[in-house]
Amino acid sequence: MVSTNKSYVTTPEDLVTEAVLRAKDVNVYYGSNLAVRDVSLDIPYNQVVAFIGPSGCGKSTILRCFNRMNDLVASARVQGKITFHGQDLYGSGVDPVEMRRRIGMVFQKPNPFPKSIYDNVAFGARINGYTGDLDELVEDSLRKSALWDEVKDKLKDSGLALSGGQQQRLCIARAIAISPEVILMDEPCSALDPISTLKVEELIHELKQQYTIVIVTHNMQQASRVSDLTAFYNAEATETGGKVGYLVEYNRTEVIFQNPTQEATQAYVSGRFG
Amino acid sequence: MTSDFSSSNSNLWQPNRQASKRVQFAVKTVFAIFALVSVATTIGIVLTLVFETFEFFREVSLWHFLTDTKWTPLFSSAQFGIFVLISATLMTSGIAILVALPLGLLAAICLSEYATAKTRAIIKPILEILAGVPTVVYGYFALLFVTPLLQTFIPVQGFNALSAGLVLGIMITPLVASLSEDAIYSVPQSLRDGSYALGATKRETIVSVILPAALSGIVSSVILAISRAIGETMIVTLAAGQNPRLGLNPLVPVMTMTAFIVQVSLGDTPAGSLAYKTIYAVGMTLFLITLALNIFSFWFVRRFREKYD
Amino acid sequence: MTTQTPLTDAKSSDFQVNLSGRYKIDTIFAIATWSAIAISILVLVTLLLSVLIEGFPRLSWSFLTNFPSRKPEEAGLLSALAGTIWMMVTITAIAFPLGVGAGIYLEEFAKDSWLGRVIEININNLAGVPSIIYGLLGLQVFVRFMEPLTGGRSIISGALTLALLILPIIIVSTRESLRAIPDSLRQAGFALGATEWQVISRQVLPIAFPGILTGTILALSRAIGETAPLITIGALTFISFLPENLQSPFTVLPIQVYNWVSRPQQEFHVNSAAGIIVLMVVLLMMNGTAVLLRNKFQKQRG
């Protein structure tokens, strides 16, 4: 397998103007180890962008740069520039707490808080000083995440009492309750059964009406089903025996899956490795 | 056994299987008996307490035991109001938990969430030292350092529940801190991430997400600490005094259940005497209270433990 | 791309994030947690200093080699020190084999068995029993009931009482040390045709031993600092001679300290502070040994 060492294919030209998030020459280090290098891409407004690639290629690492979750890992260091509406996300004027309210995140494993369903959804709104009607907000968020009908009679029950798929939709409801502009999803279906996965995928379709979504997935079918754009990452071995991820190709999903320009992309989407 | 597997040198291998098995059986039996010693201890404690308490109640009615307002078992006109001793125990333990709960819990939060690995490595051994100080040393500290210190700004007597309670609180703080820290530390990182991703600050994450998730562990650590405070002997004997007195005034001398047991033990009390039986009745009361706390803690943890996989 | 939302849609403007106010509370909270640590350390330092300042000048060779006396300036720790050493040896001789044996049985032979579970629950309960209750047990069983054997209020009675007290700690630490050893090691032994006991005694125990020893020393240091159970069995007497055998009456360091603290005279308080220093040095030496063992053990495994 010959893979190019440079990710020269970046954002499709016609989308550049509408970028919500823009990464430019981003390198991420853990301690002294370079984990991902030279990532440049734009996340356009109200689109679903899928990050695919073999494990260890850094796709989750890049995702976590977009809401500065890497700040919480003491050894992590981000180089390069990431902008949100043109403003430097890592600039001195940006507060990660305020920024995270505007860029929501859904995690790999459902992680509802040990609180009632209602309090799970209301949590973000409460701490962020929501001034509207909380009951309405909770109902609205649960409706948008297609969970309302299943839980409307047991809002006081623990969020942990729900099934895995319901828990993940609760986490999505929790994320949209603070009206973010972007929702980052880190393999949101990897811990779910096929039926729950289908529900979450349908939900993503609904949500892209209002939100910009970036989704990391292991599942290529999922990427082709839900996304408008796809970024393919790969990993290469370093001289010191580690692995460093990089962006290989980024384009409209149908191009990535049907007519990629890079050989490695072709090999990955046709299932020859990864 | 041998013929099927015969090979050229099979006669070189002659393990004494029979002997090995016999040794194994003997060891297993002996160790099982050793393990049963702990069960025998429990049975011994219960039987001893029940037997002597039963003897006690043949001479003193349960009604008087529960309703008398004086505790004068060594007087000729003896009265046995156990609540006199219980009130003192509750007072010292109550003061102790008022000290240890905030101090221990905040320390646990600091160690788990704020301190770096390096700082933790320094502070945890210090807390372990605090936990390893013999209680008689704390008794010395309460009587000869804390009480005189208190006397400089509040009118406490030489023996009082306040200084005993405060020092008792210091004694159980490491217990609350270390067990609560275990509970807080074991809250999965995914919950912290979930909270931060919603725009919560560190304190909001700790107070609204981590502490509720660790609640069962924290409660059980606090109950264990209360039970330790109730059963503690040397601090209250030395610093709280030997005056059985009903009431909740922390500035005057009182006598806790454990202090009474010590008082009687210091004298020469022949077996079979009423005083001898009385310390077992008090011991039984103490045992039942701590047992009830343990059962409650066990129940609470089972009922409220959040399961994370 | 039309947006259809039937219900209210929260906007960014609906949030009054008030970051500066929240961060202010965050800072106060962080300071509060650090203060808790600071107070704990401060109290420990105060305690140690108050003892050192009071007792250090009193320390002398004669303080260690004199018997207790009614005259504070002549009183010494000899019988208490001797009693503590006697107790240390006797408790170890009783509790170590019992605790380690029981730990091995529960972890290696009776794992997940009915009996194992009963004993486990029982040990958890015993850990919550106040130490003075053990004293009441010791008084009834060892001092009264077994008086012909133990000689009443003797070293052996005290040692048996404290051995029972620390038995659960030794059992638990033995089990933890055994649990830390990977099963692959045991399976390798079984695959060579060894019996369970051969595997345990020759492969598992040697590796677990430092951990078990550490736990035992820590448990023992707990016993050495205990006062209440020994007072309950009646060990608080004026002892101005050295113990000769297990049936001898005795006193130990914490009891001698208690005795001096509870005297009204200031001179005896000085003695008690000096006694505390000696007691703490003994405990520090034991804990230091345990920590050294643990560090060595961890290095081997790491």
Image (spheres, coloured by chain):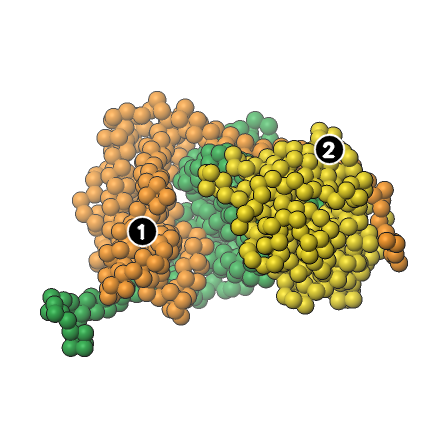
Chain colours: A yellow, B green, C orange
Q: Position of residue A105 (x, y in %)?
A: 70, 49
- Relative height, residue C19 to residue B195 (above, below): above
Q: Visible in this render: residue A127? A: no
Identified by mark 1, the residue type is Ala
Q: Chain of mark 2?
A: A
Q: Residues within 10 Å of mark 1 (few under 14, many from 20)?
A: many
Q: Nearer the viewer, residue B16 or A129?
A: B16
Compared with A150, B217 (above or below) is: above
Mark 2 element type: strand
Q: Which residue shows up at 35% across the image and 66% down it? A: C110
Q: Quadrant of residue B48?
A: bottom left
Q: Is residue C254 left or right of residue B198?
A: left
Please say if the residues under marks 2 and 1 sit with CB atoms less than 8 Å apart: no
**Residue B275: mark:** none
Residue beneath the point at 59% across and 35% down: A77
For disc 2, the marked residue is: A88
CA gap, disc 2 and disc 1? 55 Å
Say whether residue B114 is left or right of residue C206. Answer: right
Of residues C202 and C174, the one drawn nearer to the viewer in this rendering: C202
Residue A246, placed above or below residue B157: below
Nearest to the eye among marks 2 and 1: give it. Answer: 2
- Position in image of residue B2 (x %, y %): 16, 75
C115 on left or right of C189: right
Q: In x, y percent, where is residue B211? A: 62, 48
- The residue under label 1 is C208
- Amino acid identity at mark 2: Asp
Tell me the residue at 28%/24% (across/down): C60
Q: Which chain letter matches label 1?
A: C
Can residue A248 be seen from the camera position used here? yes
Pick the front one: A213 or C207: A213
Residue at 48 percent across and 28 percent down: it is C46
